[in-house]
Amino acid sequence: MIKTQFSLYSKQRDRAMHKYCKLWRITSLVLFMVINMVVGSDQAHHIPTTLEGPFKPATRRFDPSLRTGSDDLPMDHPRLKRNVTLNFPEQISLAISSPTAMWVSWVTGDAQIGKNVTPLDPSKVGSEVWYGKKSGKYDSVKRGVAVVYSQLYPFQGLLNYTSGIIHHVRIDGLKPGTKYYYKCGDSSIPAMSEEQAFETLPLPRPNTYPRRIAVIGDLGLTSNTTATVDHLIQNDPSMIVMVGDLSYANQYLTTGGKGASCFSCAFPDAPIRETYQPRWDGWGRFMQPLTSRVPMMVIEGNHEIEPQVAGITFSSYLARFAVPSKESGSKTNFYYSFDAGGVHFIMLGAYVDYNATGSQYAWLKDDLNRVDRSVTPWLVAAWHSPWYNSYSSHYQEFECMRQEMEELLYQYGVDIVFSGHVHAYERMNRVYNYTLDPCGPVYITVGDGGNIEKVDVDFADDPGKCPSAGDNIPEFGGVCHLNFSSGPAKGKFCWNEQPEWSAFRESSFGHGILEVLNSTYALWTWHRNQDIYKEEDSHSDQIYIVRQPELCTPDLNPSVVQSLPSISAPASHSLVLALSLPLLGIFSVFSYSK
């Protein structure tokens, strides 16, 4: 466990600080008990906190009345087909650039697919965003860049693809918590989009946070995807974290047709893992009603690899999405970081070099060094492939990445880790190196957005379901499968029961919502798709994730010990705040940071 180092001026002040930190924890716990009573008085269940953990492992088995998956939507589906002409913008999306800047991306022109394709000239269509604080009145204009990409296959019978023109414009000078209206396109043609709108996030501060952060993974374009996105829109997020595997265009042959839940099973004679790139265009159109007004932060998954001629990979991912790579010093879209109010997000690449001697690791260490926990108390990481996973699917698949990076994330006190890849839901107890640890992150897997590969239902601890050593070989990196060296599973590759670090798991499609309430408390809720059809909102899994900076902080700078972080909660918690203010007042001259 990381030892907290307090450099205070005297032993008396040291004891006083510990006393007040302890009292603050008690006050926080009382406060959120009040939240449960007041805000959740209409709920039948108690919302636990991680302070009550570690929890006894629990499993909710797959509901046999539900289907394990569904087919992809066809390209002529109203939400996938093209509804603009010539060079008018489509597939409009937003991404955070900085606390005062936003990326706006869109596509114009006709993509081509065939044996012989000729790329469009991106210089022929301008990239402009007109924006302002009043509808129909745009007092600022920014111009950006445009690119095209091709997906080429050197095999007889396979079709090639070249994209429409993909535009990326960075608009800056934005004020926090402000609604902006915008149009994008080329005013000289003229070919401008309909008016869109978005609201900026709060500045990085310890008492301001995004209202709701949606977390989704392994989305695809099925009927289940539709339910996930519609449910997510109903929950009205202020930003989205997408943990990889987006369109599943690589579940198709280049000629299109019907996608398969298992590519190698359906197409055993394919000379390469083919893709039908128009699925990417359909995915962009499908997502536009959401992503044109809510920023979506993406990271690559294995379904974005998409190999083609000359060993080229990730062409669609790299061309289609703007991320703050340059802004965060990474210089690559494969990993980057950004701030959203008092939360610092780190997006890591599981399919590029993650070794301790590599550039990603060096960037990660530098980024962690630059985080100021007095400004952004929460530290959240995300990547595609989970390290902790008790399902048979992808079991210990990215053990090598865990062995390379876990210690660094633990040393810097990462609070939460989101991943996908496994098509099911699982939340862990706080864990480090397969050992229950109150200072370890809360790992959460959300790889069940609705894709065509169907939901995972088998657990590695079920009889006969433990994978063999030759299973679950990663598409990138080495194999580091191991037998456990201690605990109930000592000497074994799989547990005989649900591992103690797995707090809750269930096979269901859905999305998660993270509501950060203040510098130490955040409410996590897992929303299953089937719950949208109930008269009253129902939650499959819900918990307050609680930071303990006085226990788990690797370094405490006495210069920032001035005042305890104030509560910043949604409007629905105003009554709770009024009740809690007398409790908080006595601590107004103390603070700590993680």
Image (spheres, grey):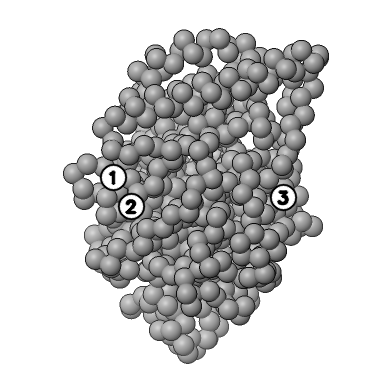
Q: CA distance from mark 2 to mark 1?
A: 8 Å
Horizontal side of 434 relative to 26 (left or right) equals right
Q: Mark 1 = which residue?
A: 538
Residue occupying image coordinates x 47% and y 90%: 269
Above or below: residue 57 compared with residue 568: below
Q: Position of residue 420 (x, y in %)?
A: 49, 58
Report which quarter residue 8 is drawn in: top right
Q: Mark 2 = which residue?
A: 528
Residue that sits furthest to the front in the current view: 488
The C terminus is located in which quarter? top right
Q: Position of residue 335 (x, y in %)?
A: 62, 52
Of 41 and 577, the residue lying toward us: 41
Above or below: residue 544 compared with residue 231: above
Q: Mark 3 = which residue?
A: 407
Of 520 and 433, the residue lying toward us: 433
Residue occupying image coordinates x 65% and y 23%: 592
Q: Amino acid at mark 2?
A: Arg
Local packing at callout 2 (Cα closer than 10 Å; few below 14, some 14-19, many 20+) is: many
Q: Amino acid at mark 3?
A: Glu
Q: CA distance from mark 2 to mark 3?
A: 33 Å
Of the two numbered discs 1 and 3 on the same chain, state the one appearing first in sequence. Answer: 3
Residue occupying image coordinates x 63% and y 45%: 437
Q: Position of residue 304 (x, y in %)?
A: 52, 65
Local packing at callout 3 (Cα closer than 10 Å; few below 14, some 14-19, many 20+) is: few
Report which quarter residue 536 is drawn in: top left
Judged by depth in the image, the label closer to the viewer, 2 or 1, is 1
